[in-house]
Amino acid sequence: MKTAVVTGGTRGIGAALVRFFLKSGWNVAYSGTSDATVQNSLQSLEGHFERRRYAAFKCDVTAEADLVSLWDGAVKNFGSVNIWVNNAGRSNDQTPFHKLEPDVFTRIIDTNVKGLMLATHLAYNRMLAQGFGAIYNMEGLGSDGRRITGLTPYGTSKRAVRYFSDAFAAEVKKGPVIVGTISPGMVLTDLTMTQVRNDPENSRQLIKIYNILANEADTVAPFLVRKMIANKKNGAKISWLTTGKVIGRFLFAPFSRRDIVSKYL
């Protein structure tokens, strides 16, 4: 049986990836940032999957020692790691950059860039030693250069993720370990809904955009998991919300009554 590791796997799209790897017959090791989130996630899986097929660990991805423990825990439980997903990330409330406290944007860069690079470095070298594996880095708003006012630190970090992933994939293109990216598009999570609740001035426009473009995590995760499992190509970009889908949704938006936001408000 094969094994996936998912950082930031206790909630949102990360938790959905954990569930659908398990539904696909894989073992899963995953991480969260606190004992409470780890325990809550374990309880959410009880009764749905065999307990011996998943393991959860507290892990700060900016700490190399925590990443080592996550890898070692996965190998101790399941023998080896076939896929490592760098999903852990932070964002900020929609606020102009100059009004943010420095610790807000430094934490975003530390987690989304430094942490992702540390995890990739560790996973790649361990996979190289075992002779196989695949690493997928989570893209997001900003990866393709798009900008939204007030999300400058987050967008900057995701732009860096794309450059790093592309550059590193090119460096290792002849090796036994592949590197790629996954892009879930706009996903309704605690983070996106917090932005709606905390920004009443712009909430109407945000809700309109979410109802056109956003999806729930359990809609997107099966697609991403299936594509990661099937992929054998280095440098692959696995994207849910393609340009064609975006154009189509905006074209049909005037005729659609799509509403996936209201039940979260």
Image: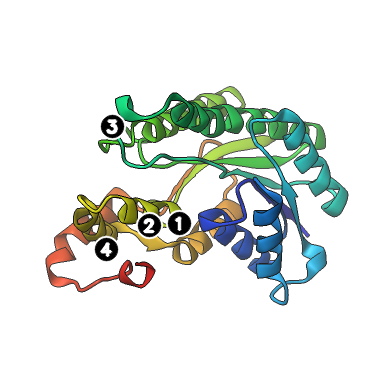
* Three-letter amino acid code at the position of disc 3: Pro
In which quadrant of the rendered image does the C terminus lie? bottom left
Cα separation between marks 2 and 4: 12 Å
Left or right? Give the position of 225 relative to 73.
left
In the picture, the quarter occupied by the N terminus is bottom right
Are discs 1 and 2 less than 8 Å apart at CB? yes
Frontmost of labels 4 and 3 is 3
Residue, disc 3:
96
Q: Which mark is residue 233?
A: none
Crowding at mark 2 (Cα within 10 Å: few <14, some 14-19, many 20+): some
Residue 193: mark: 2
Q: Which tag, 2 or 3, sits closer to the chain's start?
A: 3
The residue that mark 1 highlights is: 190
Color style of the picture: rainbow
Q: Residue at x 31, y 36 (%)?
A: 95
Asked if one can make out residue 159 in the rendered structure from this viewpoint, the answer is yes
